[in-house]
Structure formats: C-alpha cells, structure tokens
C-alpha cells in the first residue's frame, strides 16, 4: 500500500488523465472546453475526498476510513495505520500505568506522589486510611493536609536521608514514620504506622528501668547491712542476727524476681504446642491447695476448692500451674485475715472455667485496666511486703494468651474480686472422662 506508492504514480495518472481530455477535446473539436471540464472534475474529486477526510477526522468517531480511490486511498490508509499504532501504544501505556497503580495500591505503606510545589498528584488507598486523604485532595497542597511544624521543617531542610517520626494527623495515639524520596520532577511520600514498634521500644526501656529499680532496693538494703557489719567486733550480736534475717529475705526477694522473670521470658519465647499434652487440672489443683494452706497459716482464710477432677484440658502443665497458683496466692495475699476464698474449676457451655473469688480489698476501676502490665502494683509498698514483684498477673496473661483464653477481672473496692478465665471447648479433649 503506502510502502510501494511512489511520486511517479500520481504524475503518471495525471498525465494519462490530461491526455484523455486532450484527445477527447481534439476529437470533438473543443480542446479548451474539454480541458476545463477535465480539470474541474479533478479539482471536484480532490475537494470531495478532502471533505471526506475532514469529516472522518473531526466529525465521526469511527476508526475505519471511508473508501477512496487513487492517492486518497493511500492517504486514508496511512492515517488509519498511524491511528491504529497510536491506539495500540496508548493501550500498552495505559496497561503499564494500570499495573504500576495496582502495585502502588498493594504497597503496605501509605504512598503519595506530589510535585515540587507540594501539590498532590496521586495517593494510594492506604494514604486515605492512614492520613485521611480523599480522592478529592488530588490537586491540594500536601502541607495543608499534614499540618505539622516538624514536617514543614523537614521539607524545608531538604535532607531526606533519614525518615521523620510524626503523630498521625488522624489519631494522635498513632505514630507514623515518614520518608520522602525525590525522583525526576516529583516526590514520593511514604508513611508507615510504627505505633506498635514505638510501644515495644518504650516497653523495653520501661522493662529495663523496672528490673533495675526492683533489684536496686534489696541490693541497697544489703549493702547497708554489710557496711554496718564491717566492724564485727563493734556490732551487737542482736543487730547481726537482724541483719542476717533481713539479708536472707532480700536475697529471697531477688531470687523470686529473677525466677519470675525467667518464667515470663520462657513463656514468651516458648514455641511448645499446647495441644501436644493433656493436663490433669484436678490433681494439679490438689497440690496448689496444699501450698495454699501452708501459705494461709497466718491469715486463717476459709479457702474452698470446687473442682471437677474429671475435667482434663490440653495445655502446658507448668504454665497453667503457674497461672492458677498465682491467682490463688494473690487472693490469699490481698484478702484481710479470716477472709473467704473460693476456687472453681468446672465445665460450662463456653468451655472449662477457672475462677478465684475472694472477699478481699478489691481493686479500683482506675487500676483494673493496667493491673496485668509488668511490674504494675496497686500499692507498691504493700505488695513488696507480700513478696510481690508485680509480675504475677503478667505471667497469667501470657499463659492464657498461649492457651487461647484471656483473664477476666471483676472487682469492687473493699468487697472483693473474681479473677477468671475460660479455656475454649477445643482445649477439652473429646475423650476427656466426664465422671471420676
Ligand atoms: P504482685 O506480685 O505484686 O502480686 P501481680 O501481678 O500478681 O503482682 O498483681 C498486681 C497487683 O494487682 C498487685 O500488686 C495487687 O495490688 C493487685 N491484685 C492482684 N490480685 C489481687 C486480688 N485478688 N485482690 C486485690 N488486689 C489484687
């Protein structure tokens, strides 16, 4: 078609066309008139196809060109071919952009593209969720939507090597890590939610501070006594006896603390399968009962155990024992002399229920939400006297999380508390004996 169309063809056609009209004019004896008619017909033919071309390009939406002859056929075919190529290229580009957008949408971070005047060009779905941007915000200035002096200073300083940490514009409790990556004429803004990471970091710092604090107190007491005993001859034997007793009790406190920390770290790092072994809670609670009565010798509580010995569950014995005994011993420690404590282990419609109810001092609502945090104690001085480290309930919480359960606490100040949890049905083996 267009490839084999050379300039010789139209000239040859024109010569043949004019020759026809010259011969025709000469035959009829009106050469001039014949030439005028022939040239007018040629001009009319060109005008006709020019009009066709105009209508095809501007008035109709159809891709296919109108039928034409001669040079116009080559022109129409050429334009048609170019349009087809353009359409194909546009489709390919469109597909590429679509794939790029899909990839950007699937990114786990909020992504915004903006230009050097801070005008937003595009943002992904996560940017709408994390930063509260809307599709209508395209065209708006980014710092109108993220109003933070720190962010403005970060942008102005122009050094984007390190990310910036900012509170989320939607929720001041969430923390975002924001990176800006300049590329070509635009900037890529990437924000990720690092709230959990920051919380973990501050928990780690608190943890180290708490452990150091907990160890420093007994160590200071011991150091005081040791300094006093430097001059043994001068120290009255009664004082030495008192110092030894106190140092033993402080050493025991530190040992208990270290032991509890080890239990906690073991539970946290353990990957044991809770469904591997079954635990006979009945016989385990019999041992806890014996330990509770020896702990109860000074306070003389009335402790009752209402236990279904046939109720066996899947789990890790050491962990469940640690959780249950912590709850029972806490009830003894935080209930005034001659109080009542009731321990229940039974099957309910929801699963296996364990509960410890006491009529002790209770816990106020302000403390309830924080009571399972590590080292959290309602009354530090009082808890230290009972030998408490503030780690007991934290151990319980971790053990229960691994056993698909969670701790429920209901408590009323000066009336008492109930600490309970339910191990779900799937933690009870199907062949568990129902009767002894
Ligand atoms: P601790 O080792 O100090 O007992 P826990 O984590 O076991 O630490 O308990 C945290 C705090 O919760 C205790 O210091 C105590 O104030 C409170 N608490 C726990 N159990 C009871 C209870 N049965 N009655 C009242 N307060 C309790």
Image: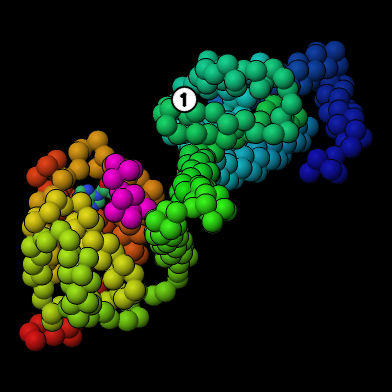
Picture coordinates of residue 398 (x, y %)?
36, 59
Location of residue 173 by image quarter: top left
- In this rendering, the count of numbered labels is 1
Q: What is the magenta range? A: 379-389
From the viewer's side, name the closer residue of 60 and 228.
228
Location of residue 63 by image quarter: top right
Residue denoted by label 1: 169
Question: Which residue is at a point 65% across and 18% down the rendered structure image?
Answer: 153
Picture coordinates of residue 29 (x, y %)?
85, 17
278 with respect to 53 (left or right): left
96 with respect to 351 (left or right): right
Location of residue 320 by image quarter: bottom left
Residue that lies at the very extreme toward the right in this rendered image: 8
Question: Which residue is at a point 67% across and 28% down the rendered structure image?
Answer: 187
6 vs 389: above or below: above
Determine if the C-beta at disc 1 is less than 8 A from ligand 1. Answer: no
Picture coordinates of residue 6 (x, y %)?
89, 37
């Amino acid at each position: 078609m267009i490839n084999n169309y050379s300039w010789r063809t139209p000239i040859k056609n024109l010569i043949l066309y004019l020759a026809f009209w010259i011969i025709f004019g000469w035959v009829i004896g009106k050469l001039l008139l014949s030439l005028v008619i022939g040239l007018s017909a040629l001009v009319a033919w060109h005008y006709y196809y020019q009009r066709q071309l105009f209508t095809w390009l501007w008035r109709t939406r159809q891709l296919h060109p109108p039928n034409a002859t001669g040079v116009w056929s080559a022109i129409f075919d050429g334009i048609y071919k170019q349009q087809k190529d353009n359409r194909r290229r546009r489709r390919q580009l469109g597909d590429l952009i679509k794939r790029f957008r899909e990839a950007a949408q699937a990114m786990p971070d909020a992504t915004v593209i903006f230009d050097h005047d801070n005008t937003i060009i595009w943002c992904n779905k996560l940017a709408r969720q994390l930063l509260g941007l809307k599709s209508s915000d395209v065209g708006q200035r980014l710092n109108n939507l993220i109003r933070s002096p720190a962010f403005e200073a970060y942008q102005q300083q122009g050094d984007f090597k390190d990310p910036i940490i900012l509170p989320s514009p939607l929720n001041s409790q969430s923390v975002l890590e924001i990176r800006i990556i300049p590329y070509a004429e635009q900037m890529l803004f990437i924000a990720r939610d690092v709230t959990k990471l920051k919380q973990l970091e501050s928990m780690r710092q608190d943890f180290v501070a708490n452990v150091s604090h907990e160890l420093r107190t007994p160590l200071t007491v011991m150091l005081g006594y040791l300094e006093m005993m430097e001059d043994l001859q001068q120290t009255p034997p009664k004082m030495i006896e008192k110092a030894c007793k106190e140092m033993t009790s402080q050493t025991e406190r530190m040992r208990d603390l270290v032991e509890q920390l080890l239990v906690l770290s073991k539970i946290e790092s353990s990957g044991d399968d809770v469904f591997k072994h079954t635990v006979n809670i009945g016989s385990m609670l019999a041992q806890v009962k014996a330990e509770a009565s020896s702990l109860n010798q000074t306070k003389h509580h009335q402790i009752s155990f209402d236990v279904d010995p046939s109720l066996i569950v899947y789990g890790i014995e050491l962990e469940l024992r640690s959780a249950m005994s912590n709850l029972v011993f806490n009830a003894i420690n935080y209930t005034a002399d001659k109080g009542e404590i009731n321990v229940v282990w039974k099957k309910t419609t929801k699963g296996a229920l364990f509960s410890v109810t006491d009529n002790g001092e209770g816990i106020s609502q302000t403390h309830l939400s924080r009571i399972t945090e590590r080292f959290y104690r309602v009354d530090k001085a009082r808890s230290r006297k009972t030998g408490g480290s503030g780690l007991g309930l934290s151990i319980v919480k971790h053990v229960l999380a691994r056993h698909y359960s969670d701790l429920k606490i209901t408590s009323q100040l000066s009336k008492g508390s109930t600490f309970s949890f339910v191990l779900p049905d799937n933690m009870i083996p199907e062949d568990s004996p129902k009767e002894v």
